[in-house]
Amino acid sequence: MTPSNWILIRRSPLPVYSGLLAQWDTFGLAEGVYSLKLEGEDLSGNIASQTISVSIDNTPPQTPLLLTAVATNSDVALTWRANTEPDLAGYLLYRNDQLANGNGLVVRNLKSFALTGTSYTDKGLPDGKYLYALAAIDQAGNVSGLSGELPVTVEVRPPHATIVEPASNQKFGGRINIRAESVDNDIASIQFRYKKLQDTGWMDLGAPVTASPFAVTLDPQALGITYGDYQLQALATDQGGNPDPAPIATTVNYTDVTPPAPPANLKISTDGTSANLSWDANTESDIDGYNIYRTSGSERKKINAALVKPASFQDVNLADGMYHYEITAVDSYTNESSHRSAYRQRSMRQRLLSRLLLFLWRQSKLRVQGQNRMLQWNSILLWERCRVLPGVFLPMRRVTLSPTPLISLPAKTE
């Protein structure tokens, strides 16, 4: 086939090395054989081309006839009459408006879901009501209209719903959402219920919920309940009026979930290899104690085995190094405050050396007045610090001692 007249589909202004060059809309064209030619031109004007032949088919197959749909336990067996088109690719089976052999909404080529026989078993369905319909698809991707629908009801087990929110053993201190789900499609209603853990009788939480999402809100203040462990239950009833014979209960804890304020005014002093910490005691009536956290390098750990009751703590047997301390408050409901109070401690060796050098300095009857005055001695650096905020220290005085005292900045000699 050598056409005498060509129609330009698209001319690309830029080179296309690999990918989509153009789309050709064949709807409205007469069915038959067409030629497609691709031309490439280089910068010198040289042209190369390739031609292929394609067949246009816009005619869908005849609508198929769905014959039977029979449920056996959780499976549904379906049969249909075969179409006679020579270019038939297969059949598309729909269950409740979705492909029975697909997974949710299908957006890719439908031919990959085509069934080539005249029967199919839809297996492992949850309880519910289903409508099946059938369409035919040909090799060109044309899809017929849908057959008449056949209804099927699957009913093999009692209804059941599971509480998915809140999580088991979750603590809550106010209003809380309760939500249940079911794999079955025939749930008519879910009645949410609650009771205290030690009680035997259940109490309804509002009216039954008759549509998805199956959810209610539990308001402890409106119900007048007190702190403690409670059980929640979702009692499902199906469209046949059958209730769940064994609903599962979820346990939650209604309690105080408000943490105390973080301890304030943390102070620290050192004594040899010990660090002495103190802070202002919290004023909440339900304070149970404090936790002490120490960071050395990249390791952070809690250093008290039990809650510290007084507003002070001694960390003993410390090696030389830099330490970072944090204090948290814990109430009687195990709520822990944030870690806002922190302090960095100098190494023990540096602190002892500072005291020794200060002693030697004072014995030499020399004084350095003001900030950042310098005295040289063996290149040993002595830093005095000034506390400007809780846990924040800035250099106040730097002293360098040398065998022959040399005052590099104005100093007062006594």
Image: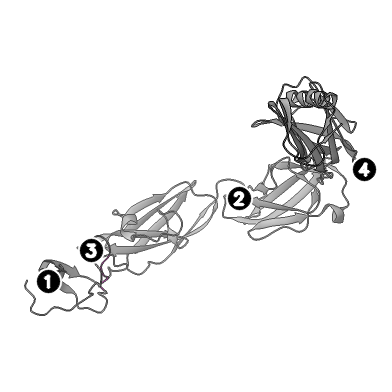
Query: Which residue is identified by label 3?
Result: 84
Q: Quadrant of residue 209?
A: bottom right
On the rendered structure, is 298 left or right of 292? Answer: left
User: How far is disc 4 from disc 3 in space, using C-alphas?
Assistant: 87 Å
Give amino acid for label 1. Gly
x, y percent for residue 245 = 68, 44
Q: Earlier in the sequence, mark 2 or mark 1?
A: 1
What is the residue that sits farthest to the top in this orientation? 317
Q: Residues within 10 Å of mark 2 (few under 14, many from 20)?
A: some
Quadrant location of the N terminus in the rendered image: bottom left
Do tag 4 and tag 1 residues touch (Cβ < 8 Å)?
no
Q: Earlier in the sequence, mark 4 or mark 1?
A: 1
Magenta span: 20-24
Instruction: Name the element at disc 3.
Output: loop
x, y percent for residue 325 = 76, 34
Q: Earlier in the sequence, mark 3 or mark 1?
A: 1
Give amino acid for label 4. Thr
Residue 17, relative to residue 328: is it above or below? below
Query: Which residue is identified by label 2?
Result: 182
On the rendered structure, is 267 left or right of 325? Answer: right
Instruction: Name the element at disc 2.
Output: loop
- Between 201 and 79, which is closer to the camera in this rendering? 201
Query: Which residue is identified by label 1?
Result: 45
Q: Residues within 10 Å of mark 1 (few under 14, many from 20)?
A: few
